[in-house]
Image (spheres, rainbow, N blue to C red):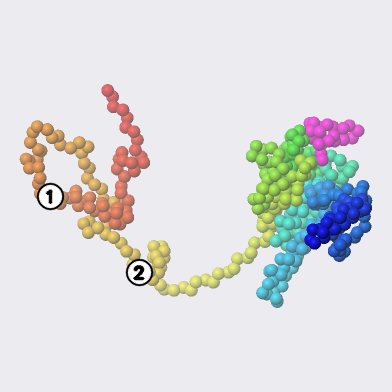
Amino acid sequence: MFSRLLAIAALALAVFLATAPEALAQDPFSEFFGSIFGSPGRSHEPRSSSQPRVRRIMPHQENRPPTYWRSGESNRAATQKRAKRTETAAPAESEGKPDAAKPDVAANYFVGVMGDTFALLLANGLEETFADKPEIGVVKKAKESSGLVRDDFYDWPKAARDIANGPQKIDVAVIMLGSNDRQPLRDGAKSEEPLSPRWRELYKARIDAVLAPFREKKIPVVWVGLPVMKNESFSADMGKLNDIYREAVTKDGGVYVDLWEALADEKGQFSAFGPDINGQIVKLRTADGVHLTEAGGLSVAHFVANEIKKLYDGARPAAPEQPTAAAPATDAPATTPAQAAAPQNSGAPIVFRSPVKPATSDAPALPERPAIGPVQALGGPPAGGGELARAAPAPTTASADAQALARHVFVEGGDQPARANRADDYLWKEPAPQPQ
């Protein structure tokens, strides 16, 4: 009976497979049992044979913006990220203190960040670095793709004057630019080749024009040098620009921050990876070999923030000294420095004194002994008498001195005087050779 039922089931399955549509034939078993038992929410519409069956493990990310770009939408995303971090940290700080509200501190010390795309990344890193110091505000005045050569695109000397004389208070100016300046510089109708003598002369004049407004307003300047680049030729030219920046800024009395070794490997060459502010090895540079990642901008901001904190601490007014009340005059005798240094209510100090000789400030010295003892003939009688064993001699002055010295060193903890030509005689010199 069972074999007959099994044969009928096999025959029914064969008939179904023969009459099934093409779409169901691609996956006969799942479609067959799905039609019998029914899958809730599943559509039984036939799938086109030309439609590929693709399983996507994870979505593609080819259209994501570069990691170093933080303008526009990326800036808003970064602001939302910091706001979210603040909101999540607020309940933890106020946990158990429902009535304790942290007062808002308004920024009173402003850092103006100027330059190209590097400056934008640096400004983002400074905002995160100074998140725990709300009294320091970061003012972004950078312009992407700008530089000192193409003043027709963006005139930095004019922008520096506007920033220094503008309504926004600037306490320190941070400048980082130059990555776009390896190009000819126009001098009237003539074009000067990059890094030529005339080009350098004109370029130094533009650097001084940027520094002049801040010098007049007595605003300190922190100039951040360019990092090592992936392309060797481009990196060499950036190093030459750094030399120009360093010379101009130090001559003007500003601060120059060198990033070359900080973002290079142990051989001084370009490295896309390096330690972040927590010591973890992360990617600091982007695939173009020029710009910084978010972690790289934060690392650069760490170096610059140290210089800003020095200027901030120096600009803060010193706390007034509290007047001290005059000590009342008494007739008590003045105490000596030794009495003042002695601990109070601790009892008299324990002093070990030698029972043989009174304690002195200097260590007792042993008597000098001859370098060579008495000569004893091997075949003759013993020197000093014929007895080989004699009673112990009576204590002499020499033995008493030895006991006093031993107590001074091992009981009282004193120092033993150095003896000439001994290991503790640091003034020992090798004796001159005797003439033959």
Residue type at the position of mark 2: Gly
**Separation (CA) of disc 2 from disc 1:** 44 Å
What residue do we see at 81% from left, 36% from top? 182
Q: Residue at 74% of width from left, 38% of height from top?
A: 230
The answer to whether marks 2 and 1 mark residues whose Cβ atoms lie closer than 8 Å is no
The answer to whether one can see residue 174 in this image is no
> What's the amino acid at mark 1?
Ala
The answer to which of marks 2 and 1 sits earlier in the sequence is: 2
Q: Viewer-proximal residue, 21 or 122?
A: 21
Q: In this view, does 341 lie to the left or right of 419?
A: right
- Residues shaded magenta: 180-200
Res. 189 image quadrant: top right
Q: Is mark 1 on a helix, strand or loop?
A: loop
Q: Position of residue 414 (x, y in %)?
A: 32, 53
Q: Viewer-nearest of labels 2 and 1?
A: 1
User: Which of the image's four quarters has the C terminus?
Assistant: top left
Q: Residues within 10 Å of mark 1 (few under 14, many from 20)?
A: few
The residue singled out by tag 1 in the image is 392
Q: Residue furthest top?
A: 436
Residue highlighted by disc 2: 347
Label 2 crowd (10 A; few <14 / some 14-19 / many >=20): few
Q: Residue furthest bottom?
A: 99
- How far across and down, in percent of the image, does residue 431 sit? 32, 32
Asked whether 257 or 21 is in front, the reply is: 21
